[in-house]
Image (cartoon, rainbow, N blue to C red):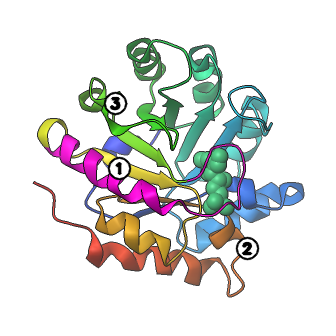
Amino acid sequence: MKKLLSEFDSRRILVAPSLLAADFSRLAEEIQRIEEAGADLLHLDIMDGHFVPNLTMGPPVIAAIRKHSSLPFDTHLMLTDPIQYVKPFVAAGSDHITFHIESGNDPLAVIAAIRDAGASVGVSLRPRTPASALAKVLDKVDLVLVMSVEPGFGGQSFMADMVPKIAELRRMANETNPRIHIEVDGGIDGETAKLVVAAGANMLVAGTSVFRAEDGAAPAIERLHATQKLLPAQE
Ligand code: DX5
Ligand code: ZN
């Protein structure tokens, strides 16, 4: 059974550790470790060497790890032409699919393809893409993913100038889709999380700060959940 994002309350802080920072030689153990540490979802970064200058994993890897986790799979497609990969990723075990508004396909067609496949839908934007680029789709998706680094690599520094964009998207969503999830991805740790949550984000992707935390994954996830009190009330 899939667990769609519509089943999660967007007034709650949700932590989605990014598998990109895990030890790739021991994926099943790494996923079990963050699941036990309190992760809400697992964030999967899918790169094609074209939309971004890096390659990661495809549907066979997702299908293999699906057997080792009960966490919902939050799948971030950094792909040119994502529409042709929607079905294979959902069939492999993705519960949620986020695509990039800059990816070249008609956004309404990608949204329809994801819904038809039975997953919940997110749309993402690169740091240079303004919030206004999402005006026409905000009421049709379950989630918007704000990139706070240039997509392609883990371990980069958080771009603080993305904070006003989060606040702008929160304001836009209050008009058209107040229960939307606002997710932020890139350079998130216990400190940067405070800034993005205060601006209205409720979903935190964190690779390095969770998988490579010196004091372990559970305290790292706890620091992210602790930002709950900063989340502004929704209208
Ligand atoms: C970057 C990816 C991120 C990345 C986050 O393209 O979308 O999910 O793995 O990694 P950290 O948390 O290390 O910045
Ligand atoms: Zn990501």
| Mark 1 or mark 3, earlier in chain | 3
Label 1 residue SS: helix
**Label 1 sits on residue:** 165
Whether 124 is drawn above or below 220: the answer is above
Task: Place residue 56 in its image quadrant.
Answer: top right
Q: Earlier in the sequence, mark 1 or mark 2?
A: 1
Q: Quadrant of residue 220?
A: bottom right
Q: Residue at x 44, y 25 (%)?
A: 118
The residue lying at 63 percent from left, 71 percent from top is 210
Which residues lie in the magenta part? 149-174
Query: Marks 1 and 3: which is nearer the front?
Result: 1
Q: Which residue is the site of mark 3?
A: 134
Amino acid type of the residue tagged 3 in the rendering: Leu
Percent of width and height locating residue 112 = 40, 15
Q: Position of residue 106 (x, y in %)?
A: 45, 12
Give how far apart the Cα atoms at labels 1 and 3 are.
11 Å
Residue beneath label 2, please?
A: 212
Element at badge 3? helix
Foreground tag (3 vs 2)? 3
